[in-house]
Amino acid sequence: MPSTAYDEVPYEDYPVTETHVDGLYLAARRAGLAAARPERARVLELGCAHGVNLMPMAFHLPEASLVGVDLSLQQIERGRERVRALGLDNLELRQADVLDLHLGSRRFDYVIAHGLYSWVPEPVRARVLALFRETLDAGGVAFLSYNAMPAWGIRGAIARALLEAVDLERPPIEQVRQARAALRTLEAVQPLRGTAEGSLLRGEIEALRHKPDSYLLHEYLVPDNRAFYLREVVARARGAGLGWVGDVAPSSLSPAETRAARGELQALGLDPLSTEQLVDIVGFRQFRASLLCRDDAERGEPTPWAELLREGFVAALPSEGRDDDPPALAELLAALGERWPELASPAELAAALGRDEAELLAPLEILVEDQRVQLRPRRLPACRAGERPRAAVLSRFEAAHLPFVTTPMHEHAPVDAFHAALIGHLDGQHTRAELVELLIGDIAAGNLRLAAESMPPVDELRPALARTVEAALQRLGLAGLMVG
Ligand SMILES: C[S@@+](CC[C@H](N)C(=O)[O-])C[C@H]1O[C@@H](n2cnc3c(N)ncnc32)[C@H](O)[C@@H]1O
């Protein structure tokens, strides 16, 4: 089997919050689909790289069954080692080209293709959509992300410039070297200095110079790289027997700005798809994640937020409160901020505030729409650090093997050597004082290096380390990385 560029320079994949089945479930219910509960979901990911996105879902949803497929054997093998080490028998990673992938009568509730569609040749794109149609169950939802127009117009021009300057016959590492040299030159040659177009180009080139090699290689040095307008993707999906459900990728516009733009554009009297397309253009959209379903799926009325809220759990970061919030919102945000990262059902929240659940639903709906309150269809294990702090087995594994750890909310947090060593000890068995001694042991054994040139005497180190550990535990708790 010929090796791919991903074998030679593996992709640095990380969990993608928007692909989590909790969010897909809620988006599908909102769109009136009979979506499958996340706990027992059947999930397929195409182009899963090392399976890093599926691993946390498999870990936190032990009754779900997940399959990841990728062309790169090297990435799949490394992923399988991790899956074995974590004992995740509900996650299967397969090496295959989607062009040859046939899953027989197997059906899935959620099919994910993230970071694939824009970067593969046309026949692969067509096969991805055909696979969605073949493998989705009746109420199932597919997640398709892609580089979007119009922002990718300018990025596409930079990618084009790099492709001109790079010899694609050379080894990937050599291509990256050539691309970096070209970026330096492009930055220096600035005939449009002082103009709006010039500063746009310069900003893009500058940002690209700081990206890792794997990003430059797999995002920009791809001859098939193509960005899409939403309308094009919806038309292609229709041609493949799929319907458009909505979108979940974050935009550079806030939810309030998006609503305002949509409202103003309604003056043109266009259909929702055209309006959405115009919002992309005025908001200079760069990335999209569209949700698709089978065109024969039964679509009922959209499920009201109130119903989803009553069935679910909410949480909000302590920083979500704003000075100009009306009292009804401020009260809720303060109560949720105190609990963060623990979730509460609206009924629990109402009991804590001495209010009626029904009174809370309207303000909660506003906060969920504004993405200041997270709504989830199930409870998560996240809590603040206790007497003997504990991180999930998954987090301890990730801290030892990956540059980040994943929260139960499916967000990833980068970890440095200190946090990795600390998280490695958070098995719920140790007090804070014991954690300090374990870290002193790591330092003495040379497994953890201090930023200082030489190690101070242990008596001086201990109090400083105790303060650092306490602060780190607070941070890890707020990041959602402590579990009960
Ligand atoms: C840019 S990476 C994205 C990885 C991951 N989904 C993410 O977003 O973090 C694209 C992945 O798609 C895989 N891929 C490309 N063409 C493929 C094909 N024809 N069949 C299966 N996988 C493919 C590559 O090996 C690579 O791992």
Image (cartoon, rainbow, N blue to C red):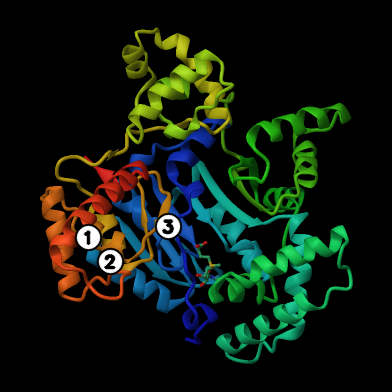
Residue closest to the eye, 112 or 52: 52
Residue closest to the eye, 350 or 4: 350
Question: Disc 1 to disc 2, how far (Cα)?
Answer: 7 Å
From this viewpoint, is residue 135 visible? no
Q: Is residue 425 above or below residue 100?
A: above
Residue 460, label in figure: none
Residue closest to the eye, 471 or 413: 471
Callouts 1 and 2 close, C-beta under 8 Å: yes
From the image, tell me which residue sits under label 1: 424
Question: Disc 3 to disc 2, how far (Cα)?
Answer: 17 Å
Q: In this view, does 238 lie above or below 306?
A: below
Q: Count numbered badges in the picture.
A: 3
Residue 171: where, in percent of width, then height? 57, 90
Left or right: 59 with respect to 146? left
Residue 353 placement: quadrant:
top left
Q: Which amino acid does label 3 sit on?
A: Asn
From the image, tell me which residue sits under label 2: 400
Q: What residue type is labelled 1?
A: Gly
Q: Is mark 2 on a helix, strand or loop?
A: helix
Mark sitting earlier along the chain (3/2): 3
Asked whether mark 1 and ligand 1 are closer than 8 Å, the reply comes as no
